Each structure stands twice: as C-alpha cells, then as structure tokens.
Image (spheres, rainbow, N blue to C red):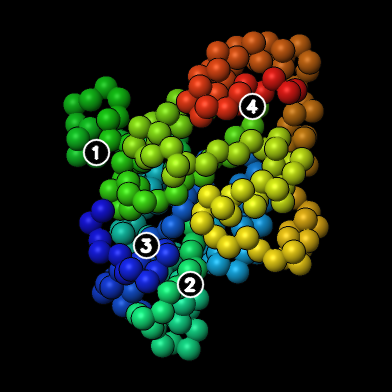
C-alpha cells in the first residue's frame, strides 16, 4: 500500500495532515456485499463488540461511486473518505485526547458499502482501463492498493437474482483466501451468534464475554421480514426454474470457496 501504517494500531492508520487529528484511518474490513443479505444486521451486531467502532456513516459508497468526478456532484477525495473513519477511531484510541504511540490499540472499524463488491461506475476513466471493452482494474484493486491486508466480508443468499461467483472470483484473484469470509444469510438467520463468533475470529477479535453474547442473541434481526416478504412473492414454479438456472453458477461458487453448502442443497 502507499501508506506507512502505525504499528500499534490494528486498523490501518497513519500520521497525516488529511485530518485535524493528525491521524488518518482506512477501514480494517469491508462488508463488500451483497444487498438484501443481512448486512444491516451484521453492522448492528458487529458494532456491539467493544473492539469494533462504528464509522461516521454506515455506507460511503466511495470505492464504487463517489471517488469519481461527475457522480452526484463533485467527486469525493481520499480526504473525504478517511474522514468517515478517522475521527471515530481517534476518539476510540485516545478518549482523553492523548494519543499514545507506545500502547496497542486493538479497535477497528469497517466500510459497509455493499456496492464495493460489484458496482464499477465510470470504470473506463481509471488508468489501466482505457480502450478496454470491460474493466481490468476493479474496486478490489483499489482496496488492495490502499491496504493489502484488508479483510473482506461477503454475505450471500440463495442467489435467485445474482451471480455471486463472478464478483467473488474477482476478489479471490486479488486477495488471499484467508482474507475473505463468506457467510450465507440462511446460516446467519438460523445461528446468528455462532456465525458472529466465527466472524470475530476471522477479524482476529477477542471472543466476547458470555454476557455480551447473550445481548447479541436477543437482538431482533433488522431486515429478515423484508427478505421473507421478497421470497414470499415468488411462486414455487418460478423458484424451481431459477434454482435450475443458477445451479451451475452455485457449483462454481462452491468450488471457489471449497464448501458444498454454497450449492444450497439444504433447501
């Protein structure tokens, strides 16, 4: 990456004049996708962990959209982007405004913009993509350039509307497998706390206390009703047709991830 990250910070932070605090931070992790797959619940429950700091805004869409000139007004710079993470991280590691470079600061924060996984607006303006019929330089390349050690999280569901493997394969070409975590919405809905503990381990966080786990267990999922409502609009015949269509693509996803559960044979 282009930055010298402070060795005592778990989150990728560096000394910089981009912020008034003098320390700029990028996300430690990206919940990069996908829409309608439980990312809001993930945001709420992850934030209960004492080491996870909520960003200023849940979704910036900077990587996929707002860094480009002409999208919804002016483009947003790296300075704009880090201001979504730097102030909250600075307050978390130095609550008394006395940043200590000699202390380990295990707090982390993340970017929950689900467009990061799949949306490539204005890709033809990116150096390296000129004169190409399709993008060679993707969002994953930018994330890797900024922080090669970033952890990437995908939430997926029985894919009746998306070819997940196409996008996830692009990320697997740019990040080691152990930096990418994929969770099924179906597993998350059945065993949210168990899945959350696995996710904490992936993020290298401390497993929370039993009391905190109980707090998480009793949280009401935010958007499962909407998911169920969406699924209820689909007839059995339509679902069977779509399942048949997506079966080979699910097989490719299961092969990429080395896990047969992504075949969705348990439904």
Q: Nearer the viewer, residue 127 or 69?
A: 127
Q: Nearer the viewer, mark 2 or mark 3?
A: 3
Q: Secondary structure at mark 3?
A: loop
Mark 4 — residue? Answer: 261
| Res. 151 in view | yes
Q: Nearer the viewer, residue 42 or 196?
A: 196
Q: How far apart in space, not on screen, are marks 3 and 4 (Cα)?
A: 33 Å
Q: Residue at 54%, 60% (x, y): give it.
A: 205
The vertical placement of 257 against 143, above or below, is: above
Q: Nearer the viewer, residue 169 or 101?
A: 101
Q: Residue at 60%, 34% (x, y): give it.
A: 156
N-terminal of the pair, mark 2 or mark 1, is 2
Q: How far apart in space, not on screen, are marks 2 and 3 (Cα)?
A: 13 Å
Q: How far apart in space, not on screen, are marks 3 and 1 (Cα)?
A: 27 Å
Kindly check if marks 3 and 4 are in contact, taking CB atoms under 8 A apart as contact.
no
Quarter of the view holding residue 14: bottom left
Percent position of residue 148, x then y: 32, 49
N-terminal of the pair, mark 3 or mark 4, is 3
N-terminal of the pair, mark 3 or mark 1, is 3
Q: Name the side, left or right, on which 58 lies relative to 63.
A: right
Q: Secondary structure at mark 1?
A: helix
Mark 2 — residue? Answer: 88
Q: Residue at 73%, 23% (x, y): give it.
A: 266
Q: Residue at 80%, 57% (x, y): give it.
A: 218
Tell me, for residue 83, which label it has, or none.
none
Kindly check if marks 1 and 4 are in contact, taking CB atoms under 8 A apart as contact.
no
């Amino acid at each position: 990456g282009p930055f010298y990250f402070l060795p005592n910070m778990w989150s990728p932070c560096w000394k910089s004049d981009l912020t008034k605090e003098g320390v700029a931070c990028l996300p430690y992790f990206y919940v990069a996708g996908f829409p309608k797959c439980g990312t809001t619940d993930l945001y709420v429950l992850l934030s209960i962990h004492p080491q996870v700091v909520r960003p200023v805004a849940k979704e910036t869409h900077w990587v996929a959209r707002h860094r480009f000139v002409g999208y919804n007004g002016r483009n947003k710079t790296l300075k704009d982007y880090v201001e979504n993470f730097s102030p909250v991280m600075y307050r978390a590691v130095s609550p008394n405004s006395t940043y200590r470079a000699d202390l380990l600061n295990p707090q982390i924060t993340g970017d929950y913009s689900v467009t990061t996984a799949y949306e490539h607006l204005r890709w033809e303006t990116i150096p390296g993509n000129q004169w190409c019929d399709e993008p060679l330089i993707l969002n994953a390349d930018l994330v890797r350039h900024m922080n090669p050690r970033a952890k990437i999280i995908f939430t997926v569901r029985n894919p009746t509307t998306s070819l997940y493997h196409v996008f996830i394969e692009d990320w697997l070409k740019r990040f080691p497998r152990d930096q990418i975590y994929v969770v099924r919405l179906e597993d998350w809905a059945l065993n949210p706390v168990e899945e959350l503990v696995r996710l904490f381990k992936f993020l290298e966080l401390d497993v929370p206390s039993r009391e905190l786990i109980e707090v998480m267990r009793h949280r009401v999922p935010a958007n499962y009703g909407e998911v169920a409502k969406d699924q209820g609009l689909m007839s059995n015949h339509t679902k069977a047709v779509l399942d048949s269509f997506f079966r080979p693509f699910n097989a490719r996803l299961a092969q990429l991830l080395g896990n047969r559960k992504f075949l969705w044979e348990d439904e």
